[in-house]
Amino acid sequence: MHGGMHFHTLCHLSSSANTTYRADCCTYDRSETAISGRIRAPNQIFGRPVLTIVIATLALAGCSGPQSALDPAGVEASAVHHLFIVMVIGGAIIWAMTIGVLAYAGRTRPKPISVRGASRLIVWGGVAFPVVVLFLLLSYAVWLMPQVRPWLPGAMDGTAEIEVTGEQFWWRILYLDQTGKPAFETANELHLPVGRRTTFRLKAADVIHSFWIPALGGKMDMIPGRDNSLSLEPTKAGIYRGPCAEFCGTSHALMAFSVVVMEEVDYLAWRAARTQAPVAPQKTSGQELFFRHGCAACHAIAGTPAIGRIGPDLTALGERQTLAAGTLSNTPDAMIRFIRDPASIKPGVKMPAFGMLPDGDIEAISAWLGGLK
Amino acid sequence: MKWLREIETFWTLFTAPTVWALHFLICYVAFAVFCAKQGALALSFDTVRLALGGVTVVALGVIVLSAWLAWRQWGFGTDDPPHDAPTDEDRRKFQGFATLLLAGLSFVAVLYVSVPLLFIGACQS
Ligand SMILES: [Cu+2]
């Protein structure tokens, strides 16, 4: 009975390596052919080192990079990573033991075992062992929780605060000063100091979104009508990426932001530049066209009369890593393409198409926007 | 204790899982109310923690008692399952054995539910 079950499982494995196998497998019972099929199956799968290496490389390539929880660059992300490793190792050991027992049961000739022995096996292996192991893993996870999510009183006191609002399909970012009053607004790109804890006040303007910077920590939903908080402490300078982690509409997959983690001096300089009385950008025909074509109704740019609040703030757009919430790289071509027909790049976007404008106008506007620093 | 032996009811089967459910509710509701009304209640965090620790001990005690009664109903394990003959005795033993297993499950479950009591640090601010 046991042998039969075991044998069928392997049949399916071997059939994937060699399709002609399947017919043999399923018609023979525990005959000699069936047994030889059982032994050959693993060789057929593992006897392809090239394939194995390719798969392993592809799998590992996903582990690093700017948007990976397995490549932590923050205190919370390290705790999550640690939790993940402990759980994977714990799970792998349990899996290996289970499969080991299964393989042992399939390979040895069945021998009668005493009722006492069987009961003992069930009580220790089937009850005591899982109860204790699960208890330990659960305790470890619960014990780790305050490090994964430091929301206890005190953890967020005296930290800098940033208010982030999820909108279909971009991120409104409002830096607050020490007294909690708005200091300046930006969009789709966060700047954070390394080694300092920052608290995020998370909101949503329309539907539920979720704020997640995998390299820095866990995610937190943004819910209309509610303020959620999350605090993060980056430990490594660098540029990371945060995706929206809750389906929010047609362009949900195109809603991301960049996170620039800077040394504290650089961060303070960046912040000071933003909070000082803004310098009016160079006046060009691009600026004139920006106002003439009504862009300022939706977009704000510090140092100009543009104070629209429907779309993202475009101050210092030229410095940003990406355009349109992590969707395009920040190049003049991409900007022209986006202004001409935003919905062809981001379906459902709330910005109208400006394809009816002369090409020269769009080029002048995007040259001006791209030059904003 | 004589009456305990004479009850012929299905309800003894559910005693332990019911205790588990009540313990779960008491723990979660107590902390939810405590954290929502932090200023309003003259209780410290550790008082609530200790009180719930007491509730846990009582819950485990009731489950152990239920397990002991079930063990007795099962005939102290003198007979092996499956107890599937159409007789009063087998029906009684079957129920006893099932109750004993449920008591074991509930005991472990109550322990697991109590793990956060050991580690919880404060209310979410
Ligand atoms: Cu979203």
Image (tube, rainbow, N blue to C red):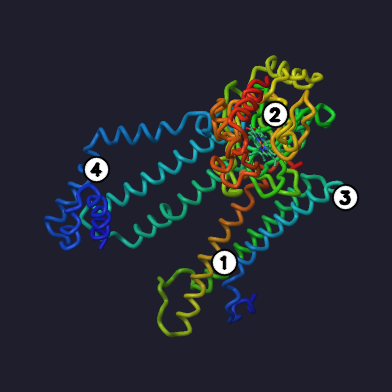
Q: Nearer the viewer, mark 2 or mark 3?
A: 2
The lab-note entry on whether marks 2 and 1 share a chain reads no
Front residue of this view, candidates B82 and B76: B82
Tag 3: residue type?
Answer: Ala
Name the residue beneath numbered marker 4: A45
User: A22 or A282, which lies in front?
Assistant: A282
Vertical comparison of A72 with A99: above or below: above
Residue A289's disc is 2
Q: Residues within 10 Å of mark 2 (few under 14, many from 20)?
A: some
Residue A144 visible in rendering: no
Amino acid carrying label 2: it is: Leu
- Secondary structure beneath dot 2 equals helix
Percent position (x, y) of residue B118?
66, 44
Characterize the local packing of mark 4: few (<14), some (14-19) or many (20 or more) Cα atoms within 10 angstroms.
some
| Image quarter (top left, top right, bottom left or bottom right) of the N terminus of chain A | bottom left
Kindly identify which residue carries mark 1.
B68
